[in-house]
Amino acid sequence: MTIPKLKIGNITAEIPIVQGGMGVRVSLSSLASAVANAGGIGTLSSIGLGDFVASLSEYERISREALEFEIRRVKKMTDGPVAVNFMGVLSNVNDLIVAAVAEGIKIIVYGAGLPTALPELVPDPSVNLVPIVSSARVAELILRVWDKRYGRIPDAFILEGPLAGGHLGFSKEQLAQPQEFSLERLLPALLEVLKGYEDKYGRKIPVIAGGGVYDGRDIARMLSLGASGVQMATRFVCTVECDVAAEFKQAYLDAKEEDIVIIDSPVGMPGRAIRNDFLKELEAKGKLAVKCPYRCLTACKVEKAHYCIAKALLNSYLGDVKNGLIFCGQNAHRSDKIVTVKELFAELVAELQAL
Ligand SMILES: Cc1cc2nc3c(=O)[nH]c(=O)nc-3n(C[C@H](O)[C@H](O)[C@H](O)COP(=O)(O)O)c2cc1C
């Protein structure tokens, strides 16, 4: 097949692959720049960049400065398109978004929360606003509110299906019926909802579909169903450039299908992770000690939290995977080698061209 370009506003990616943002330092400037240099869209994660300091204001300052550092670094490493991923449940999300825009970021991706007031925070129309949704219903809600309040529509949507990694926009009951909520069902429903707004505003709203997209055949299937591109994250963990410790990548290489499980997160959403020593200890004890001088997540009820997710994810990033949470997508068990981002793109492009 001929590979279509992906257009978001006035930004064009040669290859319609967006590398999904991966929180607590999994996708920083090394990975995002390599993806942008390979022809896709790289995504920096703004999540968990702060250290464990004494107060929320100190945490906020350190997170902001770390994000600014990563943005400046990524810009030195690539001229290609780079987005920043934000989660609505972060207590300092607005501060981080404003900082990213001030640093010249032109694609703001917003998940884990409703971005109903985002156009007010980022009124500059040259900055592309891209909500992550898991249903046509939530997309319709965002469209309705933005259209009415701001006379604006999102510049793209990321549609995340139930096979994705990290936090998931589905209940555990929904996750138990993956066919019912498959991207193949969600995507046509979302495209239908967009039509009226595309007509009203006279432009296309591209949809980028993700969650379990692993090879060229998966990408082609999403494009044939009407997606303008795909979002892939799990596949990028086992790359040389991915910012995590070698032990994190090794956990992917070692994982078997049955090791990939759904967990409860203090964020208040289910998540997908590798069942390792950390999760086994949590299952056995029910609750691990939580020390929290501040709340980095608005949704986290510290006194009820079974563990500190920021600390658990940070441990894994640093390589202490025995004491850490390892987020992954449903297809992580298919990882069998570490490749460069360039090699991965070459493989995916060759698979697409062969179809
Ligand atoms: C290790 C890991 C961390 C993730 N962290 C985030 C995050 O912080 N914010 C977010 O919006 N999505 C996050 N995701 C979801 C990805 O961005 C992506 O949408 C999803 O995993 C795509 O499915 P795939 O992994 O099967 O390709 C994460 C995924 C993984 C594997």
Image: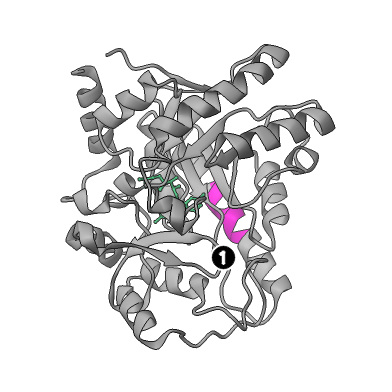
Left or right position of 293 against 144: left
**Residue 54 on the magenta span:** no
**Which residue is at 35% across, 40% downward?**
179
Question: Is residue 130 among what the camera can see?
Answer: no
Residue 170 image point, x, y percent: 49, 51
Q: Crowdedness of circle 1 by 10 Å Cα count: few (<14), some, many (20+)?
A: some
Relative to 316, say whether 307 is above or below. below
**Which residue is at 20% across, 24% downward?**
350
Q: Which residues are magenta?
A: 65-72
Q: Which residue is nearer to you in this view: 271 or 90? A: 271
Q: Quadrant of the C terminus?
A: top left
User: Which residue has dot 1 on it?
Assistant: 267
Q: Which residue is nearer to you in this view: 117 or 42? A: 117
**Residue 67 on the magenta span:** yes
- Dominant SS of magenta comes to helix
Relative to 266, say whether 159 is above or below. above
Amino acid tagged 1: Val
Q: Quadrant of the N terminus?
A: top left
**Which residue is at 41% across, 35% downward?**
183
Secondary structure under the numbered disc 1 in the rendered image: loop
Question: Is residue 7 among what the camera can see?
Answer: yes
